[in-house]
Amino acid sequence: MNAPRDATIDLQLTVNGHEAKARVEARLSLCDLLRDSLHLTGTHAGCEHGVCGACTVLLDGQPVRACITLAAACDGRAVTTVEGLSGPLVDRLRAAFHAEHALQCGYCTPGMLVSAVDLLERKPGAEEDEIRRDMSGNLCRCTGYVGIVRAIRSCAQG
Ligand code: FES
Ligand code: FES
């Protein structure tokens, strides 16, 4: 039998390296948990049905769309949001986004950065066509993508 829609679940997870506990409704999204309960508002809610990529976070190191990931599915797992990104690659990406004018309103930017980190960790020497393909799940309504692709390419090796 399925749990009632208003059932609550006690969660314990790691968010940006810190332990977090929460009591959540079974249907709560990871995006709402991060934004409303943990006040990590860098994870943006755009379409809220898995299309735009604004809510992209890393779950156990893999990019996921937080708006269509149930918080309850994250019990015992590790989440990294844009606030928790760090290291030399992240520093270079942030500087490159600035230098290449890879954002205008900035709404897509947290998801772009999370996806770009994942991309360059998997493919450090990614060429432009790979960047365009692998970033195609992140939508931007402002920039036309040219600056975003140029910024990510500038951080690729080779
Ligand atoms: S807000 Fe999650 S994919 Fe658009
Ligand atoms: S900079 Fe506005 S949606 Fe991308």
Image (cartoon, rainbow, N blue to C red):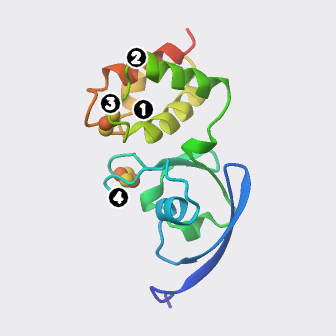
Location of residue 54 in the rendering, given as x and y in whole percent from the top left corner: 40, 46
* Mark carried by residue 100: 2
Q: Amino acid at mark 1?
A: Asp
Mark 1 surroundings within 10 Å by alpha-carbon count, few (fewer than 14), some (14 through 19), many (20 or more): some
Assess mark 3: CB under 8 A from ligand 2?
yes
Mark 3 surroundings within 10 Å by alpha-carbon count, few (fewer than 14), some (14 through 19), many (20 or more): few
Nearest the eye: 69 or 142: 142
Mark 4 surroundings within 10 Å by alpha-carbon count, few (fewer than 14), some (14 through 19), many (20 or more): some
Give the foreground label among 4 and 1: 4
Identify the residue at horizontal 61%, vertical 80% (top origin). Answer: 9
State yes or no: discs 4 and 3 in contact (Cβ < 8 Å).
no
Assess mark 4: CB under 8 A from ligand 1?
yes
Extreme-top residue of the structure = 158
* Mark carried by residue 48: 4
Q: CA distance from mark 3 to mark 2?
A: 11 Å
Identify the residue position indicated by label 3 in the image.
104
Secondary structure at numbered mark 3: loop
Vertical side of 118 occupied by 156: above or below: above
* Quadrant of picture, ligand 2: top left
Sequence-wise, the earlier of marks 2 and 1 is: 2
* Mark carried by residue 134: 1
